[in-house]
Image (cartoon, grey):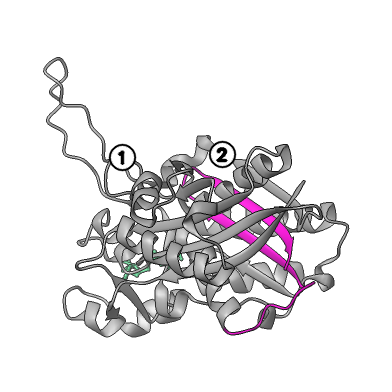
Amino acid sequence: MGMKIIGTGSCLPQTVVTNDDLSKIMDTSDEWISSRTGIRERHLVKEETTTSMSVEAARRAMENAGVTAQEIDLIIVGTLSADHVTPACACEVQAAIGAQDAVAFDINAACSGFMFALNIAHAYLQMGVYKTVLILGAETLSKIMDWNDRSTCVLFGDGAGAVVVCADERDRMLAYDQGSDGVRGSVLACKNRTNNNPLVQTGVEPEYVHMDGQEVYKFAVTAVPASLSKTIKAAGLSVEDIDYFALHQANIRIIQSVAKRLKVSEDKFPISLDHCGNISAASVPILLDEINRKGLLKPGMKIALSGFGGGLTWASAVIEW
Ligand code: COA
């Protein structure tokens, strides 16, 4: 048994914060941010939460797929910024949409979280364990940013994206690749769970996101093209056969570098980072939803997906639409 994507949905917070807005509260400028990253604005939560955005994205994806909550038998949320330690965001989504027969859990693979969740769903469907799966990437990164660290906080945004996949005799997941490198994990970290139990009492304050931007950049521009090349080859295709490359939206320069290394026109790389910033696990499903709703995806098209980030982690897939 194989897997087929049958619907997409997404939800961004209502409030848009432009680079100019940020320049009023910190020492930065639209010129610095947009020239180095391609980001012009991002959506940040006020009332919204990781769960509320997930629920809205899930409803839109189910409507797009034409499935009811009763048909969903598995919900996986890729997130590093769930609202609580427990219950999981996926369990809260299950309750809110009324998917009472679903099994629900979160996974944390940072910016690769949605891609890892997609691969988990694929394995379950291949084994015949489940039939209809709701997969989300959802983040409220604004709550784990250090708003005094201008080199990091300007890059990120909040939002949620979802896909519904179902079991199908013909597998539309043509190939995938995933990997991790914990040795280099400290270049992008958020160590915000210190133990202050009575035996330890470190008094250490929880940390916000800390990033060595240049090391992360070097990792991305080598790991992503290598993973994509490997996956495209494993699918029995060449780069020319791929209609779109839907990459994690971290930085336009990373995407341009991947396009150059693969010798593919940048036109094949749709972009959402200009208006969303980097939304970690939510980037890839939000981008997929945007290009799906623009009518760009036609049956039979080959799409290469890739996520990469904290852990370090990375994951790519080639799917047929
Ligand atoms: N506004 C204005 N100036 C800023 C700034 C900001 N928001 N943030 C940093 N600066 C300053 C720095 O203080 C530094 O000043 P100095 O030269 O006086 O010391 C200068 O700009 C250059 O900083 P630098 O870190 O060398 O810039 P860079 O060209 O490496 O770009 C990133 C920084 C973060 C944009 C870049 O490294 C990057 O995109 N890395 C990948 C990050 C990423 O995508 N992470 C997520 C992956 S999932």
Q: Residue 20, position in %: x, y? A: 26, 85
Q: Residues within 10 Å of mark 1 (few under 14, many from 20)?
A: few
Q: Nearer the viewer, residue 41 or 46?
A: 46
Which residue is the extreme one toward the right? 236
- Residue wearing tag 2: 181
Residue 316 shows in this picture = yes
151 above or below 30? above
Instruction: From the viewer's side, name the closer residue of 83 and 229.
Output: 83
User: Does residue 308 show up magenta in the picture?
Assistant: yes
Q: Amino acid at mark 1?
A: Pro
Mark 2 crowd level (few <14, some 14–19, many ≥20, 10 Å Cα) = few
Q: Residue at x 65, y 45 (%)?
A: 178
Q: Is residue 88 magenta?
A: no
Q: Residue at x 46, y 41 (%)?
A: 185
Q: Position of residue 139 (x, y in %)?
A: 37, 57
Q: Which residues are magenta?
A: 294-321
Identify the image quadrant of the C terminus. bottom right
Per the rendering, the mark at residue 275 is: none
Looking at the rendered structure, the secondary structure element under dot 1 is: loop
Which residue is at a point 65% across and 55% down the rendered structure image? 166
Q: Which residue is situated farthest in the top direction here?
A: 199
Amino acid type shown at disc 2: Asp
Indicate which disc, 2 or 1, sits on the residue closer to the N terminus: 1
Question: Could you tell me which residue is drawn at 59 percent across and 70 percent down?
Answer: 255
Left or right: where 300 falls relative to 192: right
The residue labelled by disc 1 is 87
The answer to which of 278 and 2 lies nearer the viewer is 2
Q: Where in the figure is residue 129, as x and y percent of width and height?
A: 65, 37
